Amino acid sequence: MKSLLLDCLADRVLVYDGAMGTQLQAAGLTPDDFVLRSPSPFSLRREVERTDVGDSASLQAVAMRLNGISLDGCNELLCLTRPEVVAGVHASYLEAGADLIETNAFGTISYVLGEYEISELVYDLALASAQIAREQADLFSTSNKPRFVVGGIGPGTRLVSLGQASFQDVETSFFDGFRGMIEGGADALLVETTQDLLMVKASIVAAERALAACQTRLPIFVQVTMEQTGTMLLGSEIGAALNMIEAFPSVVAFGLNCATGPVEMAQHVRFLGQNSTRPIAVQPNAGLPIMEKGQAVYKLSPEELGQHHLEFVEKYGVALCGGCCGTTPAHIKAISDAVGGHKHTADAHWIKVRNTYPGFDFSTPAPELPTPNSLVGISSLYQFQPYDQDTSFLIIGEKTNANGSKAFREMLAAENWEGLTELARELEGEGSHVLDVCTAYVGRNEEKDMRTLLSYYNRHIQVPLMIDSTEVNVIEAALQMVAGKPIVNSINFEDGEERTRKVLALCRKYGAAVVGLTIDEKGMAKSADEKYAVAERLIARTREFGLPDHDLFIDTLTFTLGSGDEEFRTSAIATIDAIAMLKKHYPNVNTVLGVSNVSFGLKPALRQVLNSTFLHFAREAGLTSAIVHASKILPENKIESEVWKLASDLVFDRRAFAEA
């Protein structure tokens, strides 16, 4: 399908509207304006009636229950009680030159509306907000300047990462709200003023589900709020936010709004300009608020805000400009005068990728413009972790795994969650870049344990996580508990394609990288050629599900050299050769190994030497990451030369005393 909005966005800078609350406060409303009556002015003019998610009968029922009680302060209710006032605010911004107007639906979330005892009106309010905005946008649209409706929902009053709401709570409520906005005529969906990356993830999943339910495609926009501390409210760096967002192809534009003015936002706008592969949106407040006579006053003038936006557009390629708290139609006019209709500059890198958004068709070809250095890696709630570690490799800590750590198993059995969290912190301190987390333990509920443990790790562990499970339900549960972009471990073809496809669908849905094991229906691949053949099949499958090559980690597997089994004497060579083949033919695909498998059965001191030696040669072949106990890995210069030679001979099956 075509998107006129994206066609315009690819052609020129677009201007958002400004603050809704500021204008409603200036409208001289009284408590009586917040009384829902039956029938309400809006229920008499509705064009969509749906008994499954809300209809005019439910409005009447709520009105009768409230019995004329004023819900003063619930601005979203004005879409039902005073739609003409809301329409007037939209009209004022459209007259000022706005290309995009946001629906008056900031708080259309069930648990937010529940504070006013109208949680069942999520769909009704969202629908009304979109229809009111649609009517005004259509009135002001011309062939040269079409106007668009963006259905936006704010962050709500609860943080998922802190356990104040569940992933399912957010997804369900946002689904109802976005469905109402889609059916009310929105041109795009927006998650705005977000403070918690896990809530953002849930809302994106909800938006995609709502679009599927309505059998349509619309752009999804996301805007986070960076506090004066330089991070989001829970401590998320801008890089962690951007990295997570870019794992979702349906998110077409990403940016910032609220909390600060343009001066404080500048460092984050610059970062996005240097790293984002999506159009950048910026909606600052009219400066930082100053308290005067008990009220917050915003002092930044319209002209000053317009000049800041001009700088953002010219320096950093910002594509969507607007205002948030304290901004007025005068501010939007100044922005429109300064940047409205500006053609994108040569460094507006995201134009090149606009044709990659599935489901959208553009009328003109995209110019070949340079792309930025996108953030290739993973992230936690707090920070971004690049795959490329320069002189090192991506170290994946292995002690947070029930299969490989006795201490972990004992604390898991005792449900010592604080102890398990401290264990993870120790791995962080030792230099692990990622933690491999597995709660599969005989006699216990793996999914329940995974949910509980990740509720701790998501909040308290800085580095990203690798979710390690063979069960699809456990993987999905884990992906709903982890903010940022994790890695899923793992997929293979041991039982055919079905499970692999299910896991890849979850990686696409929740935004995750994945480990692929070189195992097929015949078992674990042993020769280098067999490993490479299975790897190619894994690459084809991940590409089919839309995962980029760099988000696939191929584990070419290794067998123990400690058994003396003749069959496996050359197994390390096959593993290393397979890594080299992958590096040559698929340079963007990552590789990973569970290094300690190579020394299974040997004494601890010997294991440390053999693990370190094997890892050294695997890295020389192109290995990019490894699951190891970082403090137990030694560099070559820390191992006696004779011992190093013996270990090397074992790895490469060199038999100095073999018979000729």
Image (cartoon, helix red, strand yellow):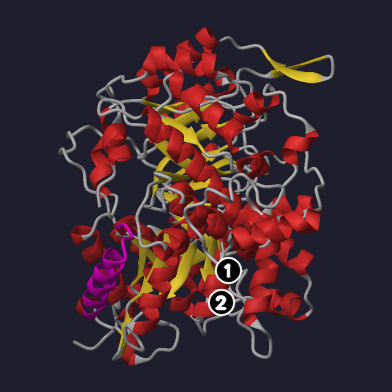
Q: Eyeballing the image, is 303 above or below 10?
A: above
Q: Is 517 on the left or on the right of 510, as rendered?
A: left
Return the mark for residue 474: 2
In this view of the protein, can residue 511 be seen by the observer? no
The residue positioned farthest toward the right in the image shown: 293
Which residue appears at 61% of the width and 65% of the height?
Answer: 168
Q: Is 120 on the left or on the right of 591, as rendered?
A: right
Q: Amino acid at mark 2?
A: Val
> Nearest the camera: 376 or 127?
127
> Nearest the camera: 337 or 309?
337
In this view of the protein, can residue 174 be seen by the observer? yes
| Image quarter (top left, top right, bottom left or bottom right) of the C terminus | bottom left
Residue 530 % position (x, y): 22, 80
Q: Is 260 on the left or on the right of 633, as rendered?
A: right
Mark 1 is surrounded, within 10 Å at the Cα level, by few (under 14), some (14 to 19) or many (20 or more) other residues, namely: many
Which residue appears at 58% of the width and 74% of the height?
Answer: 438
Instruction: Tell me whether the residue at label 2 lies in contact with that at label 1, contact meaning CB atoms closer than 8 angstroms.
Output: yes
What secondary structure is found at the residue carrying circle 1?
helix
Mark 2 is surrounded, within 10 Å at the Cα level, by few (under 14), some (14 to 19) or many (20 or more) other residues, namely: many
> Nearest the camera: 294 or 265?
294
- Within the magenta stretch, is there residue 545? yes
Q: CA distance from mark 2 to mark 1?
A: 6 Å
Which residue appears at 63% of the width and 49% of the height?
Answer: 108
Q: Amino acid at mark 1?
A: Ala
Residue 536 % position (x, y): 23, 71
Disc 1: which residue: 478
- Residue numbers of the magenta segment: 530-548
